[in-house]
Image (spheres, rainbow, N blue to C red):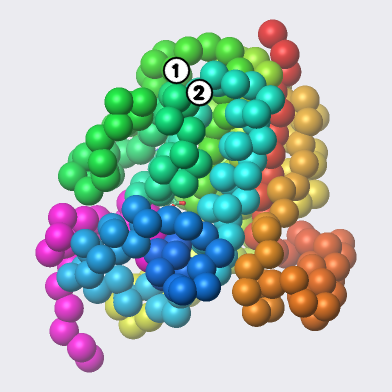
Amino acid sequence: MRSYTRGMTGADLTGVPETALWTLRNRAVEAARPDAYIDDPHAVRLFEQLAGDDLDRFGKPSQTHPLRALAFDREIRDYLDLHPGAPVVALGEGLQTSYWRLDRPDVRWFSIDLPEMVAVQDRLLPAEPNITRIGVSALDRSWLEEVPTGPAIISAEGLFMYLPREDVHALIADMAARFPSGRLIYDSIPGWFSRMTLRGKVRLTERYVAPPMPHSQTVDQGAELPNRIPGVVAAREVQLPPGRGLWGSSPVSAVLRRVADLPVIRNRRPSITALDFAEA
Ligand SMILES: C[S@@+](CC[C@H](N)C(=O)[O-])C[C@H]1O[C@@H](n2cnc3c(N)ncnc32)[C@H](O)[C@@H]1O
């Protein structure tokens, strides 16, 4: 087994916060390619800075994370075009670098993550006058008071699967009350994958097992949320943009995308949901 050292460069994270290194690594590997479809120099710089942290423990890089990041970027951009001046709230933001990818210098950005992650963000990410980092659990409602009430775009990228379903639904209801005409984007895993994580079976390498992800949601369950959560008026599935190879835009990929939409498959694959909140 090759020797390695974790935490050499200041990101000595464990548990769910450690997963931010997994997603960062996958975005950075894509962004560092000469034919990259994601432009993310900050992710590449962070990746190089963390080179001593054995990021190879996360196994073979996957396109799911850079493509997911681009899907969230597109949603945030679209919302800001409709609601200029609205703040962005990034729940469980980890080492995401969306603020710089979006390049909207005037946007007010609120980043909510656990205190140990905010300490790492403060060390490794540039300070920006428009970014407010708040070191509390997303489930701790104190952060709601720090963001002006009114329309807001909220992202929860790679977060809700780690939290209990009832807590997530209660948080969504509270956000809908605080941010009328707001929008929430989040991603979900299917039930079979959640069960695998609960049994410790998602082993990326001999040095890394993904933590338990207790909360699953299917595409059909997402579509039902306006009937289940007060203040949610619309739900839609957000598609990933095309990537490379089987994730690309070839005829084979087009067929795979159609197959992924068949009812029998669509409730067994990961998905991204956008929820609209009621007007005031
Ligand atoms: C898979 S990472 C996702 C990071 C980033 N959003 C991305 O896509 O690269 C999960 C993130 O959720 C954060 N997290 C875990 N539990 C949390 C909680 N209760 N409240 C806020 N953030 C939390 C972790 O610290 C970590 O940054």
The mark tally for this picture is 2
112 relative to 274 in the view: left or right: left
Give the quadrant of residue 245.
Answer: bottom right
Q: Residue at x 51, y 68 (%)?
A: 36
- Residue 87 is tagged as 2
Is residue 4 a member of the stretch shown in magenta?
A: yes
Query: Identity of the amino acid at label 2?
Result: Pro
Which residue ends up furthest to the top in the rendered image? 280
Q: Residue at x 39, y 22 (%)?
A: 143
> Which quarter of the image is occupied by the N terminus?
bottom left
Label disc, if present, on residue 75 of the rendered structure: none
Image: 58 above or below 183: below
Q: Are marks 2 and 1 in contact (CB under 8 Å)?
A: yes
Is residue 75 highlighted in magenta? Answer: no
Task: Give above or below for 81 relative to 31.
Answer: above
Magenta segment: 1-25
- Would residue 50 appear left or right of 18 to someone viewing this image? left
- In the depicted view, which residue is nearer to us: 163 or 96? 96
